[in-house]
Amino acid sequence: MQQSRQPARSASSAPSGRSAAGTVGGEYHALLARHDAMRLRRRILGQGRAPAPETAALYDGAADQRLITQYLDLVTPFADLIAHLYDEMFARWPYLRSLFPASMDFQQVHLARAFWYLIENLHRPDEVAASFRQLGHDHRKLGVRPAHYEAFEAALCAALRRTAGPRWAEAVEQAWVRMLRFAVASMVEGADAALAEPPCWQGTVTAHERRRPDLAVLRMRLHEPYPYRAGQFAAVESPLMPQAWRHYSLASAPTPVPEGEVEFHIRRTGPGGVSDALVSGTRVGDVLRLGPAHGTMTLRDEDRSRDLLMVAGGTGWAPIKALLEEWASRRRGTGGLAQCPVGRVHLFVGARSRADLYDAAVLDRLAARHDRLRVVRVLDEDFVPDNDDPSAGYGPLAEAVARDGQWSHHVAFVSGPAAMVGATVARLTATGVPADHIRHDPVPDPLTPAAGRGTADGPEAFMCGRAGDGVPLDLKCGWEV
């Protein structure tokens, strides 16, 4: 373990105004914050615009879906359409380029997946509206305003005509416009509903430990209260990569201190990205930005007396650690008094080798302190493919969990790489664990493209991109495990 000892960088080292990469910075976001504060004041005083009526019931998404699908071959694959769209938008409104990260590669893939999600789900407008309201809430941190969507719509129409050629029909274009406006209206509604909270939160890095060459555990102290629950995740932005966001699970339970510290476990997935900036380029004293917390892999009140199964692989240990901290605090109760009854926790932690158990000391402390916690380490290097051998229990994580016990009466929490989560959930379901007793971040994501649509990860909506691995439109995009 290596504690970061480089000289601390002050908050002033974070970019303000326009960064060297040409993206917007602190001055722009401060201006938006003042504007939102004035809007909120007018709303409180009864002078603001009334909330828009529910639009999902008024939109015939199924009809537009049929029309768009009929002519879809003219504009798919979406790569050319999206390239033309951004060429048009940045040529007509050059200032909009500053709302995007330096690299557009992820953004183009994300937008293609968002288009597929819309087209394939237009016959379920209520579901689409809910997803895009949440996305609009999350997009506030990117500085997107309603006027930007209007520019996007004009650029999309031009790109559709250019890509489709002479067979394009005005009626099809209008169906695309209605689809886009429906999604945008939901995003604006979601953003307006969150007007009373900050679009993002700033925090100062207080510790940065390199547990492995490719992995760091960092802690940051928030400058203002940050609402979240153990098991949730949040988007993180480094000043080294403005407007590029990646989602990470919070590795610590909320503390009673309003401006408390939060912890993240960051694995570097490659050079030059957000994870590289956070692992290799971040120092104590740096200021990072967090988006709002999301996720439903949380402890509920009724879980207090239940037996729990927790399964973690890789840095999927981060949210499980936070959940265990909350579970332990519930056991202590108010004033240190035990709450009863309390269930048992069976914890499985998977890694390739002992060296990859980067938080082994914390595991040991938890096991020593809590007699109702059982910890099983599952190491690939110890796997013996013989079911009669006692060491066979240390095989692949999903297999080890399925062989170890009967879990049908437990509530299960599963976190890790998508393949591991999928395999573990499948094995638990096959052994009789009810689906509503298994909590995990969705796998696969709703934007997973069908065959022939490409394989790049990470959904994103219309304006500003976030780099990263993907999961669902419910915002867990760019999450690393």
Image (cartoon, grey):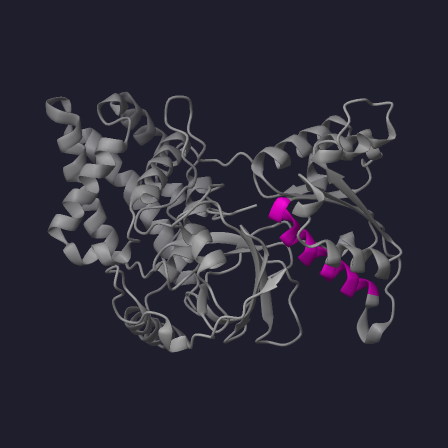
Residue at point 32%, 61% (across, down): 143
Q: Tell me: 184 left or right of 237.
A: left
Closer-to-camera residue (242/140): 242
Residue at point 43%, 37% (across, down): 457
Pinpoint residue 207: horizontal percent, then vertical percent. 57, 69
Which of the image's four quarters has the C terminus? top right
Magenta-drawn segment: 314-331
Pinpoint residue 327: horizontal percent, then vertical percent. 76, 59
Numbered-mark total: 0
The reply to whether the magenta stretch includes residue 323 is yes
Is 224 rendered above or below residue 280?
below
Is residue 207 visible in this depiction of the protein?
Answer: yes
Task: Give the quadrant of residue 372.
Answer: bottom right
Which of the image's four quarters has the N terminus? bottom right
Q: Tell me: 301 left or right of 142.
A: right
Is 94 rendered above or below residue 41?
above
- Main SS of the magenta part reads helix
The reply to whether the magenta stretch includes residue 355 is no
Pinpoint residue 39: horizontal percent, then vertical percent. 33, 72
Residue at point 17%, 30% (across, down): 163
Pinpoint residue 197: horizontal percent, then vertical percent. 46, 69
Residue at point 22%, 54% (across, down): 97
